[in-house]
Image (spheres, rainbow, N blue to C red):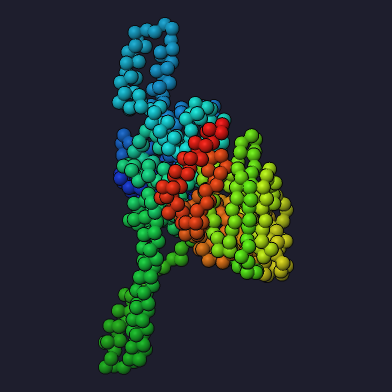
Amino acid sequence: MISANNVTLRVGKKALFEDVNIKFTEGNCYGLIGANGAGKSTFLKILSGQLEPTKGEVAITPGERLSFLQQDHFKYDEYPVLDTVIMGNARLYEIMKEKEVIYAKEDFTDEDGIRASELEAEFATMNGWEAESDAASLLNGLGIDTELHYKLMKDLTGPEKVKVLLAQALFGNPDILLLDEPTNHLDLDAIAWLEEFLINFDNTVIVVSHDRYFLNKVCTQIADIDYGKIQLYAGNYDFWYESSQLLIRQMKEANKKKEEKIKELQEFISRFSANASKSKQATSRKRALEKIQLDEIKPSSRKYPYIDFRPSREIGNEVLTVEGLSKTIDGEKILDNISFTLGHDDKVAFVGGNELAKTVLFKILIGEMEPDEGTYKWGVTTSQAYFPKDFGGEFDSDYTITEWLTQYSEEKDVTYVRGFLGRMLFSGEDGVKKLKVLSGGEKVRCLISKMMISGANVLLLDEPTNHLDMEAITALNNGLIKFPGVLLFTSRDHQIVQTTANRIMEIVPGGHLIDKITTYDEYLESDEMARKRQTYSVQTEEDD
């Protein structure tokens, strides 16, 4: 068990948390939620001991081991991948290293023998003989191939490092597991594996995530941060949402009844306070009036943007024809003879572990990259808006937000442009913010504003939920569901894929395409899909 007792954290004059008291018990997975800036990651740092509170303390049951997901992706660059995972249990790793030093000695003494015997006993107690196989199993489950297990961390890609650090946090069955955005940079297969791991994990888990489907799958309780307090709700994310909304409705209804009673008492007192025969009753009602207290209903710190993509023109039947597209990058076949045709009702989610393949396809379709072979043709009634995964260069200018968005708008009136920014929570002075100072989430909201103002009837979105908070992701999800045009998108958010897509395209190893008109959940359950993926995998190995 881990608990926070009267924890307060002040940043300058502002109290981020005030007298927080909460217990996290064994056998539960807690989803820690709250608006951007509410302090979710900060609270995890307090629990893990990385940050000292201004007041109060964190208590952990004696003898229990706490593990947390490291955020420094370069910290272990000089270590082998397997060693990095095993470091998740610091004491076990220390024993392994000390044993290596002792057994490497040429002048092995009696004292060394005694010490080695002590270490071996402790090593066996900690299941040390299974350490490497357990670490390898975690890595394989997350999609890190065996050939990478003995490489140095610095030789891995960014997404691969993230998976290794996640395996490190999970290693050795920790008693308390703290995970800050564990699904970031994970492909959907790795997320599904992590969901099953946490569902079957028997100890205490506290997780911060913007993935609603993930929280619904793994959480038994929700810890909601709002206005510096943390309120526990039993159940998963959807249950929290319904419970919190019900509580607000009940408080409003109770206040309405109290207000009606107050009005009734005030009218009686006003009519009969000067009447001698009614004076006692009027006095009694005054006392009753003084006792009525309205419940304080604080507005939540959460803010939902309004996302509404409205095409300027209706789309025709001919949308997109792709024939024989192929692309090789650095000697690797990324796309291999890909062909498909889109109709005016298609909402296509591109899935699969090769993120580069999906990004390359989008860049080809939007005209930013040339294919090695093949052609594509957009219908004459189509207009496209593109959300790139890597958008850093888009904001490398001295423009303010309003100036930047105006250049993409046919209507140059500032009030009109500010209206789109206002929908995305840029109000007042926000409009004159410089692009260079924007946070990741603000940049994403700017790009969505750009897509809305374009009036395009075809949207291409490559991982648009990165950097967004839960409220913005929910708003984007609703906006995509309502969009009457054609969608081509990638997303790690299971709920967005499931609720939005009516067609699934998976780019499998070797650059081949599986194309199915189906929902995402049905696709995942499809035996045919699994067989095709295996077939393509075998073909690729034979080609090599």
Find residue 153 and report its horizontal and vertical position in percent: 53, 30
Of the pair 431 and 143, the residue shown nearer to us: 143
Of the pair 380 and 219, the residue shown nearer to us: 380
Q: Is residue 12 visible?
A: no
Query: Image quadrant of residue 169?
Result: top left
Find residue 218 and report its horizontal and vertical position in percent: 37, 49
Which residue is depicted at the point 37% across and 11% down?
112
Residue 398 vs 59, above or below: the answer is below
Of the pair 329 and 8, the residue shown nearer to us: 329
Find residue 138 and report its horizontal and vertical position in percent: 41, 35
Residue 13 vs 175, above or below: the answer is below
Find residue 125 and report its horizontal and vertical position in percent: 30, 26
Q: Is residue 111 visible?
A: yes
Quadrant position of the N terminus in the picture: top left
Which residue is depicted at the point 41% across and 31% down?
135
Query: Image quadrant of residue 453?
Result: bottom right
Which residue is depicted at the point 55% across and 63% down?
345
How many numbered badges does the structure rendering display? 0
Residue 206 vs 139, above or below: the answer is below
Which residue is depicted at the point 64% across and 42% down?
327
Of the pair 413 and 270, the residue shown nearer to us: 413
Quadrant position of the C terminus in the picture: top right
